[in-house]
Amino acid sequence: MRNLGLDKDGFTISAVIAGCGDDVGLLRQLHSVVVSGGFDSYVSVNNSLVTYYSRNGFLEEAKWVYLVMGEVRDEVPWNSMIVAYGQHRQGLKALGLFQEMVRRGFNVDMFTLVSVLTAFTCVEDLLGGLQFHAKLIKTGFHQNSHVGSGLIDLYSRCAGGMSECRKVSQEIPFPGLVLWNTMISGYSQNDEYSEDALRCFRQMQCVGLEPLNAAPYVVLSNIFAKAGKWEEVATIRKHMRYKGVKKKPGCSWIEVNTRVHVFVAEEIYHPMIKEIHEYLEEMSRKKKRAGYVPEL
């Protein structure tokens, strides 16, 4: 467009920023074009910068753009910054910004609410989470599957909170995979709920929501491994193979005689793979004799 001499406006620049994806180098180049070209007066352009900086983990850059916008900010940068603080586990900042946003009368969306719940979880504020839950019930947002997942994540981390988790899940008319996975993960954090985790997984299968990622399978496998139920572990692994679900291979590295060796799970091409496997098998036997139970 620049070479052809075509006109650019705020909406065009915003679309180009969105096209950067996770290429932060390109995003920064565009940011310099925005400033030099006078496009930083467009709210839509600044909104896009805040959104994509925060999405790629560059919190300080997002915050800088957000502050420079001043009083022209609409709901989008407010929401984006709260989401960013929530994702970066900065709970107090997210909560403070949310309170200021509400005080000024801005509207909040589902993603903001989930981030606020994450913030309560970060600061381990169960009482604040309960009060926020009450507000969600008044607005009807508590029936949203993603918001419900945030509530379940909060309650599952608190002593005796699984009963509240069940209540939350029962209030969701159309629970999705995220909510089911969050429930299974919540049950897995306490040994006494291992059977509930399995029951939850089977209910998910009954309603036709077979997970496409390995996370819930791995959680269940770890629960049974910890309890020494190796037949159940084998059954889950067999089911994963049948469904074509694979856990992403882990990567390890070790330094031997100043040389670094890198290999991944199921590696076959490393020149010392035979020696590596022999050593790992010996270590595994020793750990089993010592009573160690690995997390799978």
Image (tube, helix red, strand yellow):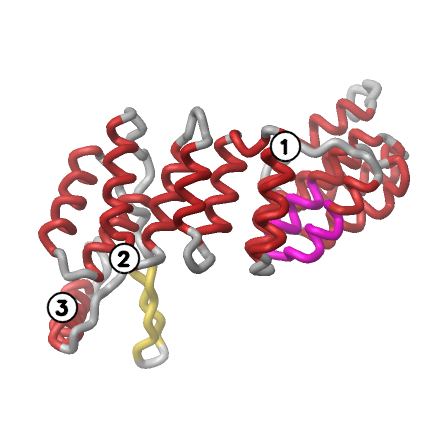
Tell me the tag on residue 281.
3
Q: Residues within 10 Å of mark 2 (few under 14, many from 20)?
A: few
**Residue 111: where, in percent of width, then height?**
61, 36
**Residue 197: where, in percent of width, then height?**
28, 46
Q: Secondary structure at mark 1?
A: helix
CA–CA distance in space, label 2 to label 3? 31 Å
Q: Residue at x 81, y 26 (%)?
A: 10
Q: Residues within 10 Å of mark 3 (few under 14, many from 20)?
A: few
Tell me the tag on residue 192.
2
Q: Main secondary structure of the magenta part?
A: helix
Q: Residue at x 18, y 44 (%)?
A: 236
Q: Secondary structure at mark 2?
A: helix
For residue 48, which quarter of the picture? top right
Residue 175, visible in the rendered structure = yes
**Residue 191: where, in percent of width, then height?**
28, 59
In this rendered view, identify the residue nearer to me: 285 or 124: 124
CA–CA distance in space, label 2 to label 1? 33 Å
In this rendered view, identify the residue nearer to me: 246 or 102: 102
From what the image shows, is residue 71 above or below residue 221? above
From what the image shows, is residue 163 above or below residue 76? below
Mark 1 lies on residue:
138
Q: Quadrant of the N terminus?
A: top right
Q: Is residue 181 left or right of residue 64?
A: left
The residue mark sitting in front, 2 or 1, is: 1
Which comes sooner in the sequence, label 2 or label 3? 2
- Magenta stretch, residue numbers: 80-98
Which comes sooner in the sequence, label 2 or label 1? 1
- Kind of residue indicated by mark 1: Lys
Which comes sooner in the sequence, label 3 or label 1? 1
